[in-house]
Image (spheres, helix red, strand yellow):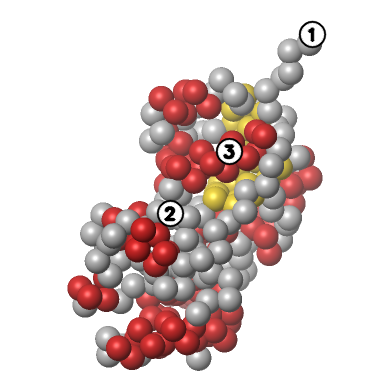
């Protein structure tokens, strides 16, 4: 019987910090086990070789230039499966902060008198430009979720994203609500799937997984009222990762 070839995987990055890809290196022995199941042909964080023949493209970063648009379309044409990897790729991430002002003002603030030389467009997640087959959320991605999505890909099965808020996971992990500790938290409206990772480790939820579908915005407003906070307080925190989706979040909460 002919041995089935392993799927070829390539990693790509756009506008990002490349911290998401480092999570693969942080897997340790699990990453080595992964190489028994797939053939990694391009991954500049961990190897010098770079192949151009691939089945699965794992893409980090948001789209912020015309060149990015052309490049991600070429990657999509070659890849049988495209994975949006991390907050920048899935929801625009911190790069979306520039979307709340004009592009000219954003360029002026960053590049000063060299602003005219810079090509930039509004920040977009990958699925604003191409079809995405799988999403791995978070900043940085949560390793158990990375593994779960990779298993789904190898088995040819879909990976449905959780459609309930992080608060559910906090309750299951018996965390003390961050509001009880005088911290505003995005957990009530943020999509779960990280096992309330940040809150488990004494932090608050910053909304890096994006908005859950049909959020209970009235309940969220009740929480704000109970703890003496305004909607603007939450929006200012939520847009740290979600400014590229600004209009959507404004409609939900204003």
Is disc 2 placed on a helix, strand or loop? loop
Neighbour class for label 3 at 10 Å: few (<14), some, many (≥20)?
Answer: some
Mark 2, other Cα within 10 Å: few <14 / some 14–19 / many ≥20: some
Task: Compute the Cα span from label 3 to label 2.
Answer: 16 Å
* Residue 41 sits in quarter: top right
According to the picture, the residue beneath numbered tag 3 turns out to be 150
Q: Of 177 and 61, which appears nearest the observer?
A: 177
Callouts 1 and 3 close, C-beta under 8 Å: no
Outermost residue toward the top in this view: 1
SS at circle 1: loop
Query: Residue 19's spot in the image, x, y percent?
Result: 42, 47
Question: From the viewer's perspective, is residue 111 above or below residue 162?
Answer: below
Q: Secondary structure at mark 3?
A: helix
- Picture quarter with the N terminus: top right
Q: Which residue is drawn at the image coordinates 53% and 27% (left, top)? A: 34
Q: Which is nearer the eye, 206 or 15?
A: 206
Residue drawn at x 30%, y 88% is: 226
Tag shown at residue 194: 2
* Residue matched to label 1: 1
């Amino acid at each position: 019987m002919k041995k089935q070839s392993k799927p070829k995987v390539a990693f790509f990055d756009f506008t990002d910090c490349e911290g998401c890809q480092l999570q693969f290196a942080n897997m340790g022995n699990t990453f080595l086990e992964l190489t028994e199941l797939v053939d990694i042909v391009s991954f500049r964080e961990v190897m010098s070789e770079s192949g151009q023949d691939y089945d699965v493209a794992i893409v980090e970063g948001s789209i912020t230039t015309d060149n990015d648009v052309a490049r991600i379309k070429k990657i999509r044409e070659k890849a049988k499966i495209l994975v949006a990897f991390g907050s920048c790729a899935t929801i625009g991430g911190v790069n979306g902060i520039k979307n709340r002002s004009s592009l000219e003002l954003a360029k002026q603030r960053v590049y000063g008198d060299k602003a005219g030389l810079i090509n930039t467009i509004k920040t977009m997640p990958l699925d604003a430009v191409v079809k995405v087959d799988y999403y791995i959320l978070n900043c940085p991605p949560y390793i158990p979720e990375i593994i779960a999505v990779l298993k789904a890909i190898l088995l040819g099965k879909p990976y449905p994203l959780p459609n309930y808020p992080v608060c559910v996971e906090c309750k299951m992990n018996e965390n003390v609500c961050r509001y009880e500790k005088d911290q505003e938290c995005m957990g009530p409206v943020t999509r779960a799937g990280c096992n309330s990772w940040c809150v488990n480790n004494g932090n608050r939820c910053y909304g890096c997984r994006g908005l859950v579908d049909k959020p209970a915005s009235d309940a969220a407003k009740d929480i704000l009222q109970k703890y003496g906070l305004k909607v603007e307080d939450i929006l200012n925190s939520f847009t740290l990762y979600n400014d590229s989706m600004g209009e959507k979040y404004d409609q939900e909460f204003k």
